[in-house]
Image (cartoon, rainbow, N blue to C red):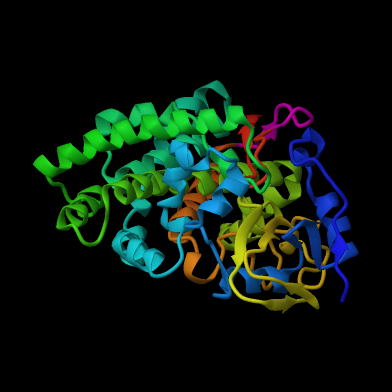
Amino acid sequence: MSATTAAPFDPRDPAFVGNPYPVFRRMRAAAPVLQAGPGRWFITGYDDTALVLRDRRFGKNFDDADMLMGRFGPTAMQEPAVLSLSHMMLMRDPPDHTRLRGLVAKAFTARRIEAMRGYVQGLTDGLLDKVIPSGRMDAIRDLAFPLPVLVICELLGIPEEDRAHFVTGSSSGAALLNPTPPTRAEIDEANEGTLAAAAYFDALFERRRREPQDDLITQLVQAEEAGDRLTMAELNANVSLLFAAGHETTVNLIGNGFLALLRDPAQWRMLRDDPSLIPNAIEEILRYEAPVQVVARSVMEPLELSGVRLEPNALVLALVGAANRDPAVFEEPDRFDVGRKDLRPLSFGGGIHFCLGAQLARIEAAVVFETVLRRLPEPRLEAPDALTWRTSFTLRGLTSLPIAWG
């Protein structure tokens, strides 16, 4: 089959960021595998995306200096943010990925994560107690952002006196995850955030060497001290990854869920009247507005995908946001339906890189929606036509969502 080339689109265009799905729909109608440029391919279908996520013939290849310079520019190997990214398990292939994930997986056992539910409930009630008397809140600033930040701080073992700094902070470095080359300003911002995080965590690591605690950071510091399982660069990069990944997806899941539900009051009322639907509603939110819209992989060996020949080192961009709305799998895919049957969204990835924090994100979202449905009478969007989205192509979420009630 001859390759079809994707029509150009601007991933920074506010209209695309606000609603990328019409573009995805046109791409999928053109061909399931589209050429994005020399050695670059877009994947739009559900089955192909699932294969890319799970098949070992697609890897990360982040130890290739030429690949990094091709993606981030000729100074890639001198950029602190790029070097930190290259040490993260998210960007590594086996055996490094296997070793690094094994070190942190013990903190994400089903029993330990389920035990966090009471802590999540207490935080949720406390955050709502602060805003309920006023009758309004910014659902991102006042709930969706601080809740998962505080939860991952607890799980990692960040001291309580330091947590307020993280709650009032902001995300940086997301631009490096986009499939488009970052601007110099975006690299500078990512470098600044990387160096600030490294300075904080280096000091905390030293503190945990002197004063071990029952937390994940202590476990990782002890693995680094053993000398053969974790380097200092890997320690710093992967704690930073766990902190960022531990809240990024959940912030977007909760915020995107609020928006979808408040745009369709009938769906809100259905959920309020039957809270047993909440777990299914979370899967529908993950499908309808995937918090992670695109996943990149390198082709590791020659193969065919939907009749298109892919060569080694080609970059494959699996559009999860498009795959989750594939009409071959989901009937009326552009309709939000908390009662939808047979939901299998690809939003947490798959294979060896399946999101470690998926269970925790689902618990946090379930607690938030159950509590808000119970405690907020008739909430509504305050500015439905003035939504502010993050400019990231990869991470889909709102920067602000004013709501009111009562």
Which residue is nearer to you in this view: 318 or 161?
A: 318
Q: Quadrant of the C terminus?
A: top right
Q: Based on the displayed image, in which of its 4 quarters is residue 89 positioned?
A: bottom left
Tell me where residue 47 appears, x and y as whole percent: 71, 74
**In this orientation, does residue 120 appear?**
no
Residue 355, horizontal then vertical, whole percent: 48, 60
Which residue sits at x=32%, y=59%? 104
Compared to 288, does 208 lie above or below?
A: above
Q: For the point 49% across and 64% down, which residue is it?
A: 353
Left or right: residue 120 versus residue 140 is left
Among all residues in the image, which is located at the extreme left?
A: 210
* Left or right of 207, for residue 63: right
Q: Is residue 244 above or below residue 406?
A: below
Q: Which residue lies at the image location 70% right of the left edge and 32% below the top edge? A: 381
Q: Residue at x 81, y 68 (%)?
A: 32
Residue 259 x %, y %: 68, 41
Residue 247 placement, left or right of 258:
left
Q: Is residue 30 magenta?
A: no
- Majority secondary structure of magenta residues: loop
Q: Name the quadrant of the N terminus.
A: bottom right
Task: Locate residue 195, reporting x and y percent.
Answer: 39, 31
Q: Is residue 8 above or below residue 142?
A: below
Q: How many marks?
A: 0
In the image, taking residue 265 as reference, residue 374 lies left or right, namely: left
Quarter assignment of residue 17: top right
Q: Tell me where the magenta segment starts and ends, as one range.
A: 377-388
Visible in this render: residue 329?
Answer: yes
Give the camera-side residue of 320 and 250. 320
